[in-house]
């Protein structure tokens, strides 16, 4: 009987160990798959977050560019209108020069070449601003404002 008990015990022990233990490879594989899924979800979440941030940045950049274009166009429009008004005043000066005499005529004759030169420089610098962006545009605008003040003063002082 001992002979049958030993093999039977061995069979039962082996069977019990086979059923009692999950396959260690399967458990590890499930853990690995779960970790891979979590990693993939994290990457997808990061990518989604990156794409969302990039979209927000693109919107802000587009808005800033649109605002800059509007600002530049409004400035240019205002300056061209100011120049048209100043051109009328220059033509009035030229007409006055034809009828003026003495010191008035001498003052206008002396001022007109300077006024024309300053006007040409102003128009040239104004046209050059069309291609400028950012701080270069800000610097050019400040320079153009100074030129405008000088041109306007020259016309005012020529009377």
Image: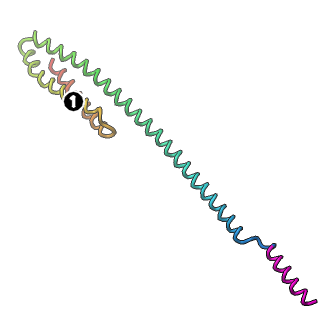
Q: Quadrant of the C terminus?
A: top left
- Viewer-nearest residue: 7 or 85: 7
Extreme residue toward the bottom, this view: 2
Task: In the rendered view, tell whether residue 92 sits above or below residue 157.
Answer: above
Q: Which residues are magenta?
A: 1-18
Work out whether residue 9 or residue 101 is closer to the camera in this orientation and state it: 9
Residue 153 in the image, given as x and y percentages of width and height: 20, 24
| Res 149 quadrant in image | top left
Residue lying at 14% horizontally and 20% vertically, measured from the top left:
158
Q: Residue furthest top?
A: 99
Name the quadrant containing residue 79.
Answer: top left
Display coloring: rainbow
Tag 1's secondary structure?
helix
Q: Name the spot of residue 14 as percent of width and height, x first.
A: 81, 79
16 within the magenta span:
yes
> Horizontal and vertical percent for residue 17?
80, 77
Q: Position of residue 116 (x, y in %)?
A: 15, 23
Please state if 40 lies on the left or on the right of 22 as rendered: left
Front one among 146 and 46? 46
Q: How many numbered marks, from 0 up? A: 1
Q: Is 110 placed left or right of 152 in the picture?
A: left
Q: Which residue is mark 1?
A: 124
Left or right: 61 in relation to 88:
right
Identify which residue, 102 or 31, lies in the foreground.
31
Q: Residue placed farthest to the left in the image?
A: 102
Q: Is 43 rendered above or below residue 131?
A: below
Position of the N terminus, as image quadrant, is bottom right
Q: How would you rate the neighbour count of disc 1 (Cα within 10 Å): few for under 14, some for 14-19, many for 20 or more?
A: few
Query: Which residue is pictured at 90% across the width and 89% down the height?
Result: 3
Residue 7 shown in magenta? yes
In this rendering, is residue 28 above or below 125? below
């Amino acid at each position: 009987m001992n002979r049958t008990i030993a093999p039977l015990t061995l069979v039962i022990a082996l069977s019990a160990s086979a059923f009692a233990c999950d396959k260690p490879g399967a458990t590890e594989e499930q853990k690995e798959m779960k970790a891979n899924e979590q990693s993939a979800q994290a990457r997808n979440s990061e990518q989604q977050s990156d794409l969302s941030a990039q979209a927000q940045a693109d919107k802000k950049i587009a808005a800033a560019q649109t605002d800059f274009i509007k600002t530049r166009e409004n400035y240019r429009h205002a300056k061209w209108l100011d120049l048209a008004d100043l051109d009328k005043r220059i033509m009035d000066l030229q007409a006055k020069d034809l009828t003026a005499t003495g010191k008035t005529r001498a003052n206008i004759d002396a001022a007109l070449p300077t006024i024309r030169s300053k006007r040409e420089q102003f128009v040239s610098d104004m046209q050059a601003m069309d291609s400028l962006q950012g701080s270069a545009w800000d610097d050019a605008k400040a320079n153009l404002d100074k030129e405008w003040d000088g041109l306007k003063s020259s016309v005012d002082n020529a009377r």
